[in-house]
Amino acid sequence: MNCVHLDFHTSPLIENIGEKFNKEEFVKTLKEANVDLITVFAKCHHGYTYYPTKVSTMHPNLKFNLLKEQVDACHSAGIKAPIYITMGWSQKDAIDHPEWQHIDFWTKKPVRFGTVPTPDMDPETPLYDCSWATLCPVGGYSEHLKAITEEVCQNFDISDGVFYDICFMKDACVCDACKAGMKERGLDPDNYEDARKYYREKRIEFFTELNEIVHKYNKDAHIFYNGGADMNRPEYGVVQSHFELEDLPTAWGGYDFMPIRAKYFEKFGKFYMGMTGKFHHAWGEFGGFKNKEALRYECADMLSIGASISVGDHLHPSGEIDKSTYAIIGHAFKYVRDIEKYCFDTHAYTDIALWMSHTEADLGASKLLQIMHLEFDVIENANELSKYNLVILPDKVKLSDEDKSSLVEFAKNGGKVVCSYESGFDGLGIEKLEPSKYDIDYIETEIDEIVTPFLSYASAYKTKCEGEVLAKIREPFFSRTAGHYCGHKNTPFKDENADYPALVKNGNVLYFAHPIFESYNKTGNYILQKYIMRAIESHYDRMLVVNNFYSCGRIRVRKSDKDNFYAVHLLYAPPVNRGNVCLLEDFPRVDGIEIELKVSENVKNVFVADTNENIEFTQIGDILYLKVNNLVLHKLLIINY
């Protein structure tokens, strides 16, 4: 499904709101851009509604029911139109009801995002980017949100769903309403864990109440609480009908974060979509346009992980839809339309599981697996182990006794285990003694021409390990402190190795003593990358081998059990940092990519999804050999069996 998230946060200082909105032009532009769904606004962050309201305040310079016009126009053209309601940021409500504001547990002050204007501030003070006061949906504000929801459901067709925004800021609140609620439940407002517990419980209860209101009017309406698609907040999945994975790679950390999030939420079995933006930088950037090929890449990237697509836009206050924006979106969505039938109702084809630690280490491991051109799933317990041949436990995985027993049996039965730092345990032949006292240390093993001990950017866990030592540790002379330092940066290494190892192989278990995946994620160090990759490659018999493909290239393999095909996505576009963004600008051609894929079925044919070009292949036993030329940006190979 091709979706647009159409923001409309519009100042009360701007006049003639929506006066250039034209229903026919609106839907014509959307249809030409292959848009299936567009989110439209009931209430925005400025705190105003875009329809006549009895429970809130309509935008003072809007003279008609813009929301109704948009919903009716979309439905007349067969386009879905879920309705947006702001939750956490509503500036007018924050001014009119300061008691509704979210109060930070630690500072006991109202939570602010950016520099929020105050009555005593010089009105000519420059204001940069997002600047909003945050509200807490407990007490009086919760009643207001329920009233808004009821009013929207009574007056509009909400069959396409409701989108609530800014639902999770911080993880605890001590506003008066929250403190009173905690005391009623026997919780201590001065205890952080109690405040977190109440925050979680109260939001799930409140969102359940909102769901009941919406479903009273349409039992099938989709409902999403933005911010709830967070890998560290899985408890909120119960109140979501689906997941929208908001990710602006240009401004929010690059192109490596979306894949692991999609893999995590895919396992919930609900509909999920990625969400990027048409903007060069971030949300609400009027006049900022992304390279249309970059947007096409981002859409193809989402499809390669089984996600539907949402692209963010922001409507001009006049209400006139921007033709330039939809030329860019339409270019990407046309390509999606050509290949999407091969992208959904598929699952990752892999025998690798990444066991989530819910720390930074997960992202480091995900990046490395993508660089190695290895497909993977994510897991959180031992119930699914039998599906895999290799399981990776990065740095700080919390394991129950049952999980540990299952992992020991998994390894005894031939499964390969890679674990690091705190994730190792006695049953795997790893006796953890204590963390090293040093701030950093060095790893001694030969990597290409590097024979000198190289920096780990962390320090190891001291262990006694069974098995073969593959790399050793050099400690520094001392940790770098005000009283002990040497030169500009880290302290150099001693002349002799430490008496505990850096890397050990014990049968089917490979153990890194460092928080190696977190270190890699923080530093991107090339030698660390080689060190980790070579160890894993020597430990695991790959079912997918890719040669002559760059580290920025991505390959993802998905399988349709229903329609008997494999979908092999190849993507290549090297990101560069320019100014304050990470962007895709060049899309060079790549030839001679060699793929070896283990498949048990007899392959009938291989072709390119959008052109139907046949690809020559050789199958010897259970290995399929392919050679791919002329990859520009994205190529989807369909392997029929």
Image (spheres, grey):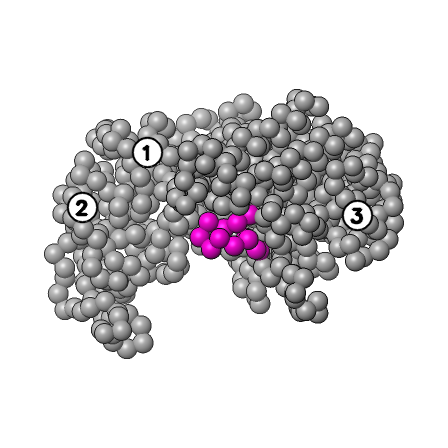
Expressed as whole percent of the image width and height from the top left, the position of residue 564 reads 53, 25
Give left or right: position of 636 versus 72.
left
> Does residue 31 appear anywhere in the picture?
yes
Mark 1 or mark 3, earlier in chain: 3
Helix, strand or loop at mark 1:
loop
> Measured from the top left, where is residue 476 in percent x and y?
20, 67
Label 2 environment density (alpha carbons within 10 Å; few <14, some 14–19, many ≥20): some
Q: Could you give the CA–CA distance between mark 3 and mark 2, rounded to whole angstroms?
A: 62 Å
Question: Where are the magenta residues, as a range?
Answer: 102-113
Find numbered disc 2 in the image and state the secondary structure of the residue it sits on. strand
Image height check: is 46 above or below 234?
below
Q: Earlier in the sequence, mark 3 or mark 2?
A: 3
Q: Which amino acid, by three-letter code, is at mark 2?
A: Lys
Tell me what residue is drawn at x 68 percent, y 55 percent: 284
Amino acid type of disc 3?
Answer: His
Find out whether the residues at labels 3 and 2 contact each other: C-beta distance under 8 Å.
no
